[in-house]
Amino acid sequence: MSVTVHLDKPHTHFTNLDFLSGKVVLHLPSEAAVGGIQVKLEGESRTRLSGPRHPHHESDKRRAESEVHKILYKVVSVFPTPAVFQASSPGTSYTFAAGKYEYPFHFKFPFNNACSMQNSMLTNLNISGLKVEVARDTHRHVKKTLPPSLSGFPGMADIKYYVKATVVRPQFYKENIRGIAPLNFLPIEPPRTGNPSEETYARRQHQFSKTSNTSKTKSLFQKVSNASLRDLASEPPRLSADARLPNPSILTCNEPIPLRVLVKKLSESSETIFLQMLQIELVAYTHIIAHDLKRTESGSWVIMSRSNMGIPLGRGSDPVESEWTVDPSMWNRTPLPNSVAPSFETCNISRTYEIEIRVGLSHGSVGNVKPQLIVLPLRMPVKVYSGITPPQALLDAMNLPGQAKPTDNSSRPDQSAETSDRPPIPPRPAAPPMPANLEDPYEEAPPSYEDAMAENLSPVDGPRREYNPPDASSARTTVETGADVKSPVQPGKESEPSTPYSNHEANTSVESFDMLPSTPPESQSGSPPTSPVARQQSILKTTRTAPPEDLPPRYSVAQGQYQAPQNTSIQRPPRAEFRAMNLGVPNRKPVPRSPSSRS
């Protein structure tokens, strides 16, 4: 006996409001008894983290916590039909003759997730090697748009969607037959708001240092050239670099980055500014929660990287406050990789992004560029949208006046019409303050207006973006395919910047993060712990060394802190093999019947 699931229109990925239809094919080589056939459309968000068993005591004993959320669960019974099921008694089995049977099914993807308060034992069961683990139920739920399919963190976090067909066997000693067809899901993006004429920007200012000619000692009567005297007398150029994005800062899957890079002249100088290197990198932060354990994994995609360009920006005779725009053709033809997932938040997994632009500048004259190179890193938080726009009918329905959510003030009686003849209310004892961190702040939310309208709306009729999340391989990698490995984020702890220059004052720069024109700056609450304003030096970022794979990571409880275990063992060079020393005396064998042989 075997069962398979066949989809009528297998897309590269599905989205909200899509219809999912297919058929269940049951093959019976011989006669068999069947209690029923069910088809389920399911989505799971599963995490697993390990941490110390006693957080406040130093111990090598560790514990593993698993958290599973059934974010999508729809069931349809294809056999028996509802009429047959109601006419039959409970526990009735049906005998099928040998052959092939097909049963069609039909589903529609909703808008929001719908976590169940209590999972089944089979859902919470996790078999890791020879160890069987059972995840504890949690009451922390987030009701938002269905998250995208996510993989690339084997054994730690994943989000899966699939269609499962189950053939129920009436005999308790026979296992049910199941067939699973995995799906790839990419959600509809939220409505875009903001003013297209506004821009969000990250800015860093810098002033080059004076070049001192100390490499060669001049004699007393040697004539100093006018150029050397001019270099020593004039102040080095001062400039600023800007990275600008439309407000709000939104990137779209499979589309180029709408970025502008500008360099501005801030001081009077006759030297020309040269663009030597430019790198654009998208950094992803995946926040993983498993009950009281938290962890943040980071990975990055290098969108473009060029060096040794030597492109002059304007001329040395340009006035102060001149702005030079870097040619956007270097990056506006390169779309985001199709493995980049949109920003999302669900009960135990969330994804945020930052974009980092490194601008390498030098100064001098054409044909005589000074060797001093400074790299200005500009970092700003961004959101990544799927590019699948919601239907216009849904947007129109959400903008109706009658669909506005009531505020807290509307539910209270209007006291402005009350007269002042009433005596004042005597003071009452204040209620005890509520704790700041509640254990279960989420409640079961009612069906949203989007879910109520989902059954009456047609599927999205528009372009579909490519989305291919990396397959979860057996290799112990914690970043997605094509991503650069970065060390886990440690909130509150910043790495020491390594600068290749000896003059620290020359490398000092000031960075600002704001929005154009005069609008409040964008909130960085969703930004990972390393904020752009916290960096005080313009540095040439070097590659970080990944931690050794043979050492398991350690986690702190409910803090998200990652501390790699320190290897205190001292590596000693291998000892050379023992070799007999040749002293020039031949080896003598004992003579038979000699005193030496008897002893």
Image: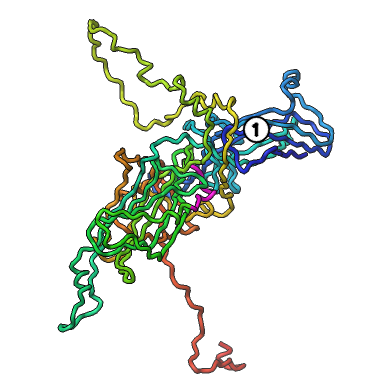
x, y (%) of residue 289? 46, 41
Question: For residue 134, which quarter of the picture?
Answer: top right
- Work out whether residue 513 or residue 536 is closer to the camera in this orientation and state it: 513
Quadrant occupied by the N terminus: top right
Viewer can see residue 469:
yes
Residue drawn at x 60%, y 41% is 13
Residue drawn at x 58%, y 41% is 126
Left or right: residue 67 versus residue 490 is right
Residue drawn at x 52%, y 24% is 447
The crowding category of the residue bearing disc 1, from other C-alpha atoms within 10 Å (few below 14, some 14 to 19, many at least 20), is: some
Residue drawn at x 36%, y 44% is 200
Look at the picture and state if 159 lies above or below 535: above
Viewer can see residue 287:
no
Q: Amino acid at mark 1?
A: Lys
Left or right: residue 267 versus residue 599 is left
x, y (%) of residue 17? 58, 32
Look at the picture and state if 10 lies above or below 429: below
Left or right: residue 440 versus residue 67 is left
Predominant SS of the magenta segment: loop
x, y (%) of residue 563? 40, 52
Q: Residue furthest top?
A: 421
Q: Which residues are magenta?
A: 333-342
- Work out whether residue 537 or residue 246 is closer to the camera in this orientation and state it: 246
- Work out whether residue 197 or residue 209 is closer to the camera in this orientation and state it: 197
Quadrant occupied by the C terminus: bottom right
User: What element does badge 1 sit on?
Assistant: strand
**Residue 477 covered by magenta stretch:** no
x, y (%) of residue 495? 35, 55
Look at the picture and state if 279 lies above or below 398: below
Q: Which residue is mark 1?
A: 40
- Work out whether residue 272 or residue 424 is closer to the camera in this orientation and state it: 272
Q: Residue furthest left?
A: 220
